[in-house]
Amino acid sequence: MASFEEELQNRRTFAIISHPDAGKTTITEQMLLLGGVVREAGTVKGRKGNFAKSDWMEIEQKRGISVTSSVLQFDFQGKRINILDTPGHEDFSEDTYRTLMAVDSVIMVVDSAKGIEPQTKKLFEIVKERHIPIFTFFNKLDRDGRPPLDLVDELESTLGINAYPMNWPIGSGQILSGLFDMYHNRVEVYHPKEGADRFLALNAEGTDLAEPNEIESAFAWNETQEEVEMLKDAGNEFDENQVLKGELTPVLFGSALTNFGVETFLETYMQYAPAPASKKTVDDKEVEPDDDQFTGFVFKIQANMNPNHRDRIAFVRCVSGEFERGMDVTLARTGKKLRLSNVTEFMADSRENVDTAVPGDIIGLYDTGNFQIGDTIYAGKKKVEFEELPTFTPELFMHVRAKNVLKQKSFHKGVTQLVQEGTIQIYTAWDSGDYILGAVGSLQFEVFQFRMENEYNTEVVLEPMGSKTARWISPDQLDPKMASSRNLLVRDRNENPVFLFENQFAERWFADKYPEVELEAKL
Ligand code: G4P
């Protein structure tokens, strides 16, 4: 049996960020294949369905909450990997952002025909703020893509991070022949002939093949050789410390669909990705993962959408100490004591009851309404409370009211609880006090509406206000007369004033008119 310290050092917990359709599901499957968890590609249950709303919302037939794919755990090269799902598509919500608070590193998958797309950029901003390592995989090399130099250039300029290519494509699409693997001084051949080696050695200088051999496309090979020389002369230096601080991203290429380059990518990831990190408390102390005391924090609460089964699961990231089933913990916010006996761990092929977990692992606690997003739980006597999770700036807004005015009481109760749970954000209009809901993804409104009806027996009317830019203003600088129809003045949950700008034009107009006013954007 591995010791606690070994188990801890062996954990790697990451999320994949990408734009929808870049290949997140496909690469996840290939990784599970490499980990020996599934035997065939395409078996991550339901493929897209598993990561998407359809599956999540039609839970009627199922007793369980469809979270099997929220966290996947598997072993690779003696290490235990936890992949946390970051729902994209129409499932994009604040949960997607919050998941990034619970990982130690991130893999970014980019479609090499499309380059950096908006959703990747958004998610990347959050990762950057946290200074965690990020590993880039340019996918779909088997299709004609954009020139690799362009892609790396764009990555650096749009995301403001330095890139360090570790391998380089030899052609793409029809003429894809392999990868020039500068890091291992070899060529990884795409579709090697039967019986032939998958890897070809390079000469000592790393400029050409060690032994004469035919690369399928001579044209592509020459071009690659030139580009690799250029990278060696003018590219960034490799610096592991910069990787660990999230300032330099290792870049690798491949094709998830044809399982090309994925293993090399995962190996590189395993080599440089960090073991579970410490976490800051509200009194500015760091809780180290090898601390004896078990601690963890709730980063996501998933409600069952089935009205007959109102259980919820609170997802807890273990931060320190060893978790054991049946353990007594304290919920820091309320001081309430809880016994953790009904706990779930997430495996790739099943949800299993968990007996122990170590830092870096995610456990699911059945919740009857005790938890809020960001809550700390700890075992033992010494109180620990982690720093709050950030609130993310919503971009979509809706007016909301109860359809039946006689339902005000349950309406308020439902709104308050769902906001506390982190389902949605609430704002109130400055003058009228009307409720305005804010979200980063439209799914949040649907979930809100559904749960209000089913759990609080209150039908709600939602009126879209469209997308707005929220900017916080210091109360000292605020004059309510600054508000107009193009910049609505509202209060956030903590009574802070916020302007909701109709568009960038309105924001610029405001900045010109009130140059002394500082507006603040949150994450
Ligand atoms: P996502 O989770 O990031 O949204 O992407 P997903 O893996 O579902 O991939 C999106 C589409 O791109 C899928 O095709 C998938 O087969 C394809 N794809 C992923 N990786 C590669 C690759 O390396 N090369 C090529 N050529 N295609 C790739 P689809 O037809 O939209 O979905 P499906 O019907 O095959 O499920």
Image (tube, rainbow, N blue to C red):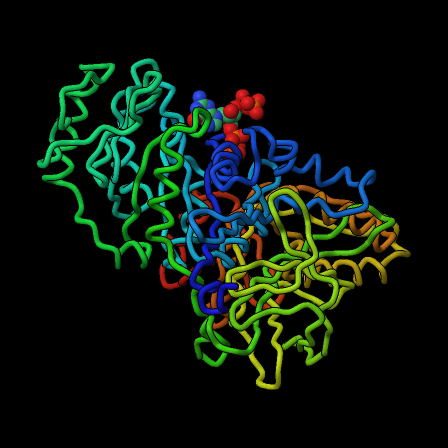
Residue farthest along the right direction in this orientation = 406
414 with respect to 314 (left or right): right
Q: Name the residue at 51% across, 58% down.
A: 102
Residue farthest along the bottom direction in this orientation = 381
Question: Which quadrant of the structure image shows residue 366?
Answer: bottom right
Q: Position of residue 319 (x, y in %)?
A: 52, 68
Badge count: 0
Compare residues 26 and 387 and report the one nearer the observer: 26
The answer to whether residue 510 is visible is no
Q: Name the residue at 58% across, 51% down.
A: 94
Q: Position of residue 333 (x, y in %)?
A: 65, 76
24 with respect to 327 (left or right): left
Q: Name the residue at 25% across, 40% down.
A: 166
Q: Position of residue 283 (x, y in %)?
A: 48, 81
Q: Name the residue at 40% across, 63% down.
A: 517
The answer to whether residue 278 is visible is yes
Question: Which quadrant of the structure image shows residue 209?
Answer: top left
168 with respect to 19 (left or right): left
Compare residues 222 and 112 and report the one nearer the observer: 222
Using the image, determine if residue 189 lies above or below residue 96: above
Q: Position of residue 382 (x, y in %)?
A: 57, 85
